Amino acid sequence: MATAKTRKPRRRATGHEFIAGTLSVPVRQFDLVDEARQRCQEDSWLRGTGRSSKTLVKHRDLRIVLISMRANTRMHEHKASARISIQTIAGHVKVRLREQTVDLPAGQLLVLDQCLPHDVEALEDSDVLLTMSWPPEDQIEECKTGSRRKVRHDRT
């Protein structure tokens, strides 16, 4: 007697599975205007948080993320163990640090050292390019403890 074989439906790759290996290729080029336009068509922008992001480049020591934010949305205070740059491509954002506030209209770039607490607020619909660069593992500051203790770098 023959037994009918049931075919398991093939699961489509999504998220990180879908892009596996595509973010760390040696050469990449982007149309940031087109990428930003696509971000503004996603559910998170239209009906959700008013924020949408896409990781464009992902290496062990470097990450570049395009973030679109609706006017009057905010990324609450956070910090990164990487050094970061925030470049406003379109619109106008405000970055609040503990001791100062920095206006970043389109065309402006801000660079922050490791572990600096900050928040970001969009004053108008904005597109921001976030770049994160990590030093070698043994040179990363400990942000989780809240200390600004630096790991000693001995060059031999």
Image (cartoon, rainbow, N blue to C red):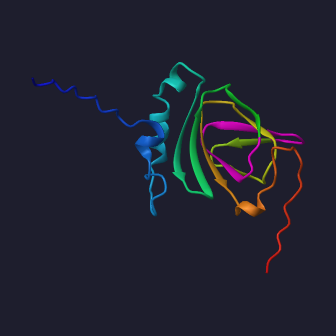
- Residue 148 image offset from top left, x and y in percent: 88, 52
Instruction: Determine whether, in the image, residue 47 is placed left or right of residue 100.
Output: left
Residue 41 image position (x, y, % from top left) = 45, 28
Residue at 81% from the left image edge and 44% from the top image edge: 144
Main SS of the magenta part reads strand
Magenta stretch: residue 99 in it? yes
Q: Quadrant of the N terminus?
A: top left
In the figure, 130 relative to 9: above or below? below
Identify the magenta region: 79-101
Residue with the most extreme top position: 47
Name the image quarter holding residue 4. Answer: top left
User: Above or below — where is 127 with respect to 72?
Assistant: below
**Residue visible at 60% across and 23% down in the picture:** 49
Pinpoint residue 121: horizontal percent, then vertical percent.
71, 32
Q: Is residue 86 left or right of residue 45?
A: right
Residue closest to the far front:
1
Tell me the quadrant of the picture where the C terminus can be found.
bottom right
The picture quadrant where one finds residue 117 is top right
